[in-house]
Image (spheres, grey):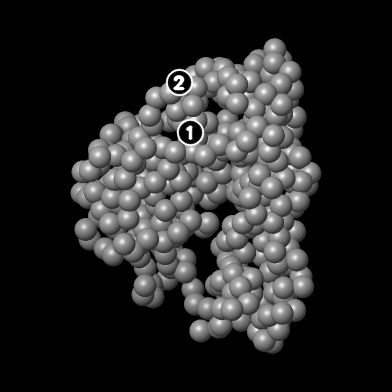
Amino acid sequence: MIKKKQNMVFKGGVNLFDAYKIRFCNIVEEISSDNPPEVFNFTLPSEQSVKHIIVTLCPTEPWALPNWVTLGHKTTVFFDKIKELQTTIFPEAKCSVVITNNETEHISAAKEYAAMNEWLEVFVIDAKYPYDDPVVLSKAILNKDINFGQDTLSQGILVFDAQTALAIHKSRILNKSVNSRFIALSGTGLKENEFIKVQLGTTLEKILKNRVKETAPYRVFINGPLRGMEVNDFAQKIGWTVNDIVVLAAQDKKEMFPMINTDRLHFTTNLLGELRACVYCNFCDDICPVNLEPALYHQAYNRGEKQKVRSYDIEKCIECGLCSFACPSKIELLRIIKECKSPDVQKA
């Protein structure tokens, strides 16, 4: 069965594919670890605790790993493996596959497969960030309210992407070990955007060796600059949860006439401006995918009323970073929200 979730019952989100057009080299290079590779280990919940499975074929960030790298244009084979997982491990669970509307190849294959398999529901969504977030998907697909950081299994929902689904199938159904995964490498700090297949346990230092531009400083983010984590210790090892690595050229000084240098400064850490007072544009409110009001949080925060901020449904924030991304005054709204969520954290 095919269902469209175009508006996702939310008003916000942004199409990052239009904003950042990233071209990748289509050759996949393999990188081995200097030590014995680690092995994929996914602790499956009990059959009784899983009521619904959501498989995400909906990357919403241009630096994320695209589906064709994982599936190899064999969508029907992938659905056969999902069916085997569902019938063998979770026979009572319902299964939904979520695909963004720019994935025409997978949508076409899904329509044909779903027409012959009633156990499968296929949802087509807008390619907007962060519509692939488990919290957003759980609300849009199943009408389940889940807070950020809450395990979806507490509501009986198991969410995983295509690569994790294939790894579970190989390790649990075929009883073969999985010790490597695909990762997307991109950013203005790299010589080239590319895909790699890397053994688990490989250090970040080895991955970036000879790939980073030597002409300028850079910053490294695992799983994207918006909702990912900045890494300073390059001895860190790559685990299964690493989907992509983004290396951005570091811009820590003023630029003359940045408005005429947008191509060169595009997708760097440059703020293209300085911190200034809120101009009450409400861009942050309009772009929020879970219908919150970051501008209201900022006003209460400036008055020292962090406790009041916590009364404004702040626990619903999924920390996607779009409020900070959209703010023309460069106010660090996400940092303010995180600080208000944690009562013990004091303002620096």
Mark 1 is surrounded, within 10 Å at the Cα level, by few (under 14), some (14 to 19) or many (20 or more) other residues, namely many
* Picture disc at residue 174: 2
The residue depicted at 33 percent of the width and 51 percent of the height is 237
Q: Nearer the viewer, residue 250 or 244?
A: 244
Q: Nearer the viewer, residue 319 or 240?
A: 240
The residue depicted at 21 percent of the width and 43 percent of the height is 34
Q: Position of residue 117 (x, y in %)?
A: 69, 16
Real-space CA distance between mark 1 and mark 2, rounded to the nearest whole angstrom: 15 Å
What count of labels does the image hold?
2
Q: Position of residue 219 (x, y in %)?
A: 35, 62
Of the two numbered discs 1 and 2 on the same chain, state the one appearing first in sequence: 1
Q: What kind of residue is marked 2?
A: Leu
Q: Position of residue 83 (x, y in %)?
A: 61, 20
- Would you say residue 79 is visible in this rendering? no
In the rendered image, the vertical position of residue 97 relative to residue 260, given as above or below = above
Q: Locate residue 294: give its quadrant.
A: bottom right
- Would you say residue 304 is visible in this rendering? yes
Q: Position of residue 157 (x, y in %)?
A: 68, 40
* Picture disc at residue 37: none
CB contact under 8 Å: marks 1 and 2: no
Q: What kind of residue is marked 1?
A: Gln
In the rendered image, the vertical position of residue 129 relative to residue 334, given as above or below = above
The residue depicted at 52 percent of the width and 46 percent of the height is 61
- Judge left or right: residue 52 versus residue 272: right
Give the mark toward the camera: 1 or 2.
Answer: 2
Mark 2 is surrounded, within 10 Å at the Cα level, by few (under 14), some (14 to 19) or many (20 or more) other residues, namely few
* Picture disc at residue 163: 1
The residue depicted at 70 percent of the width and 29 percent of the height is 93
Of the 4 image quadrants, the one containing the N terminus is: top right
Q: Locate residue 328: give its quadrant.
A: bottom right
Which element carries disc 1, helix, strand or loop?
A: helix
